[in-house]
Image (cartoon, helix red, strand yellow):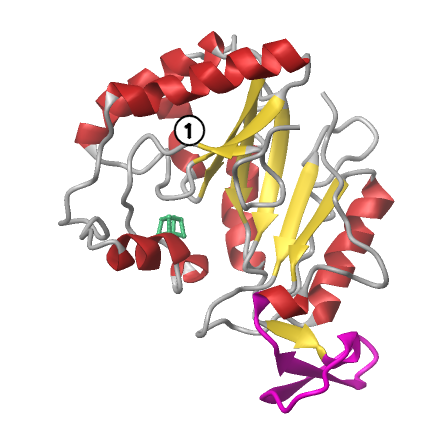
């Protein structure tokens, strides 16, 4: 299947604009901000302008939709990797409006709207009780505090085809049990977890990822392990001298993490990859 995004869990990425403002610890080492700076753009923070795009950019999803129709296979589009669709800025409303028109025009694309501002969803989307069938709505939960703030907001939008949580970077143990599916309750359909990448990455204790996977498996939610990130459990195999730190497993035994870098760290968790995606 056609895929032009390097992000494992999506086929395409679409950005209605570039630029954002940091809101929580997950944003500390925002890769999108670093990337924008690298290409010479000052589009981060409340006082900076945002970058907008031409009609040609907005026609791209129409092309992906035609290709998906031709292949007879829906595709996933991550929106947005360089912004937050629900950021509160008046000049973004026009571009959001364009996005809300585009989504129902591309029925073969499943739109993954991932936000750290789920409290703004209801006032931003125009669909009320009749949502397009191709909206997958997600929020970030990097630690328990932000899980408990954001996930209840997300769960209000049961009209979305898929409700998902991105726990990347995963910064602590997460007890998600009250948000996952249970008899008589829909809950979160899909959890994506991963460690942070980049030179300033904060290490992820492997137990945090294991525990989240086990909660998802027990509840019947889909689980996707995206990456270890910059720090990796040493037992994955290291034959050079890397910086190391020690964390404790759930029984209090030490686990060594080595600073291998994202590529070498890979994405194998307990002997296999976890690539589950909801089927709709
Ligand atoms: S919300 Fe997302 S894009 Fe915006 S600063 Fe945070 S991590 Fe970066």
**Camera-side residue of 54 and 122:** 54
Magenta segment:
234-262
- Residue furthest toward the bottom? 241
**Camera-side residue of 231 and 23:** 231
Is 232 within the magenta?
A: no
Q: How many marks?
A: 1
Task: Tell me: is circle 1 under 8 Å from ligand 1.
Answer: no
- Tag 1 residue: 121
- Give the percent coordinates (x, y) of residue 277: 72, 35
Name the residue rendered at 61%, 65% in the picture: 263
Quadrant, the N terminus: top right
- Give the percent coordinates (x, y) of residue 72: 68, 12
- Give the percent coordinates (x, y) of residue 35: 33, 55
Name the residue rendered at 21%, 48% in the picture: 43
Image quarter of residue 115: top left
As drawn, 185 above or below 256: above
Name the residue rendered at 64%, 82% in the picture: 258
Name the residue rendered at 58%, 58% in the picture: 144
């Amino acid at each position: 299947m056609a895929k032009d995004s390097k992000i494992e869990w999506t086929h395409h990425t679409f950005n209605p604009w570039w630029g954002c403002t940091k809101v929580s610890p997950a944003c500390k080492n925002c890769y999108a901000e670093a990337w924008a700076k690298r290409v010479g753009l000052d589009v981060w923070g409340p006082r900076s302008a945002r970058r907008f795009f031409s009609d040609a950019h907005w026609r791209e999803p129409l092309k992906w939709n035609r290709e998906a129709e031709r292949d007879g296979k829906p595709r996933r589009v991550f929106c947005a990797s360089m912004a937050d669709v629900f950021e509160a800025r008046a000049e973004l409303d026009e571009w959001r409006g364009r996005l809300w028109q585009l989504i129902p025009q591309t029925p073969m694309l499943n739109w993954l709207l991932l936000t750290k501002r789920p409290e703004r969803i209801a006032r931003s989307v125009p669909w009320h009780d009749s949502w397009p069938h191709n909206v997958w709505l997600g929020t970030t939960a990097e630690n328990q505090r932000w899980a408990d703030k954001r996930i209840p907001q997300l769960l209000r939008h049961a009209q979305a085809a898929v409700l998902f949580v991105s726990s990347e970077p995963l910064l602590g143990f997460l007890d998600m049990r009250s948000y996952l599916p249970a008899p008589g309750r829909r809950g979160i359909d899909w959890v994506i977890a991963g460690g942070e990448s980049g030179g300033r990455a904060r290490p992820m204790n492997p137990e945090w990822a294991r525990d989240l996977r086990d909660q998802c498996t027990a509840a019947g939610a889909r689980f996707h392990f995206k990456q270890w990130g910059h720090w990796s459990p040493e037992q994955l195999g290291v034959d050079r001298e890397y910086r190391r730190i020690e964390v404790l497993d759930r029984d209090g035994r030490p686990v060594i993490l080595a600073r291998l870098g994202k590529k070498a760290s890979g994405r194998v968790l307990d002997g296999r990859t976890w690539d589950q995606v909801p089927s709709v």
